[in-house]
Image (cartoon, helix red, strand yellow):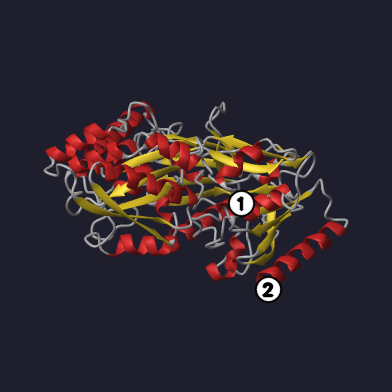
Amino acid sequence: MIHRFFKIVFWVSIVLLLATSSWAAEKNMVFASPYGITTLDPSVSYSTELGYMANIYETLIKVNPPGSKELFSFVLATGYTASKDGLEYTFALRKGVKFHDGTAFTAKAVKFSIERTKKIGKGAAFIWADLKEILIIDDYTVTFVLKKPVPLPQIAASAYASYMMSPSVGDRDSAWFNEGNDAGSGPYTLKNYKNGESWMLAKFNDYWGGWEGKHIENILVKYTKGALTQLQMLQAGQAMLVGRIPLDSYSSVKNGKTTKVLYGPSYQNYMAFFNTTRPPLDNVKVRKALAHAIPYDDIITIGFNRNASQARGPVPQGQFGGTKDVIQYKYDLALAKKLLAEAGHAGGGFKLTLTYAAENAQEARFAPLIQSEFKKIGVDVEIKALAWSAQWAMAKKDPKTAQDIFLLLWWPTYSDPYETLYSLLHDEGEKPVWNLAYYKNSGYDKMIREAYETTGSNPEKSLDLYVKAQNLIQKDVPVAWVVDITTNWPMNKKLQGFVMNPAYPNVPFLYEIYIE
């Protein structure tokens, strides 16, 4: 009865909105979204709220989609120059920009925003670790001074921790933002925020980009967990855009009378961490055997309806550092059995625990496929579907009592592969964060750092080092890289102008979209 009551209230509110003159069909839409909000603080945000934050806040520059003429496009900056030693980057700032509270965007806002993010030190703030200081040259010129020659443009264009915000925020903390307040300069401002229910991304009248031409002005976001509910809303015309539908429904939606599905590249991938701290997975031959026993093609077919490809390593194909020069493990049960025998485990004879996030429908579909194939080489797998928070807590408590295999969906924070390679596999000591293989290799750590500091001055050398680092870990197999996935967005056929950018996963750039 409670569920039915809220459902009635929601649709009554939609009817009322449609009845008002300001809710014209060609300028407004409903987005049924499965992506929840962890925090609305732009300094702290590091999760699925990215799709909303990227429409409320802006960065100095933005990574362009693959195939573009230029690597970056300018947003709140209009250009930049770098010193020969790569330790200073000077940005010219866009004039005439206002934040949603009316404050003008100047160099003061740049310095305030990044220093606030660094000081709080949460989320993806680590990307600024090599920043020494920010110098205000004048109101519309700012210089970033670095400790090491790292690729500052990629950092400034990051999907997280690089947002500009109004300096009027002052010393307000995350609680202020989480009440539904925002301090961005983007095309939309946050209105009517009801956490876990719904909120409005409303047109910011003074947006520097202007509102001439075709744009959607107001987007009512309805937080909708169920894939089936999203499908029903899309097919009934109650939502024009949804984030997730049942896998078996894609064919009918793709070919529907009023619906379509857009597909595009993605820098997201799935992986299986092996717990390298205890037997039998402390033996590299056992890990190699298991990597050869994963049914990659079946996973692509059954788990992803062919909208994926077998991964080669931690860096997805298409992203800088993702190349075919990285070693790839192939499904081969005969070789898997041979390697197990060489490791002293002829016929298998051991049991492993595999965990995955219960909220992840794809992992739920392909985890049993791994279990089935491992059984064929004599390895029993106990699957534990845990809430993400529980899976995370179990993995971080103590590697010696943690899971044997941890399934994870990953996407990078910014477009240089260092963040992925560093986060997933650098030596984290006794307190693991993302290195859920608990892997330690000082040679690897040194190699990726050298590559990172070389990206700006010598990208060819940097790429070579990144490939060597990936092949080094492929030989050690702390992780089995399962699939690189294809992004998809189910929507109403009337929606046009939708651009998918793999550097910003699960972000619908709403300002670019219009209703035909």
In the displayed structure, 199 sits above or below 471; it is below
Left or right of 405: which side holds 98? right
Residue 223, numbered circle:
none
Left or right of 18: which side holds 31? left
Q: Which residue is mark 2?
A: 1
Mark toward the viewer: 2 or 1: 2
In the image shown, does 465 or 149 lie closer to the viewer? Answer: 465
- Estimate how packed mark 2 is, as few (under 14), some (14 to 19) or many (20 or more) residues with alpha carbons within 10 Å: few
Is residue 186 visible in the rendered structure shown here? no
- SS category of the residue bearing label 2: loop
In the displayed structure, 327 sits above or below 514; it is above
Q: Which residue is mark 1?
A: 106
Look at 36% across and 41% down and name the residue there: 418
- Tell me which amino acid carries mark 2: Met
Q: Quadrant of the N terminus?
A: bottom right
Is residue 183 visible in the rendered structure shown here? yes
Q: Quadrant of the C terminus?
A: top right
Look at 64% across and 53% down and name the residue there: 230
Q: CA distance from mark 2 to mark 1?
A: 52 Å
In the displayed structure, 338 sits above or below 171; it is above
- Most distant residue in the bottom direction: 2
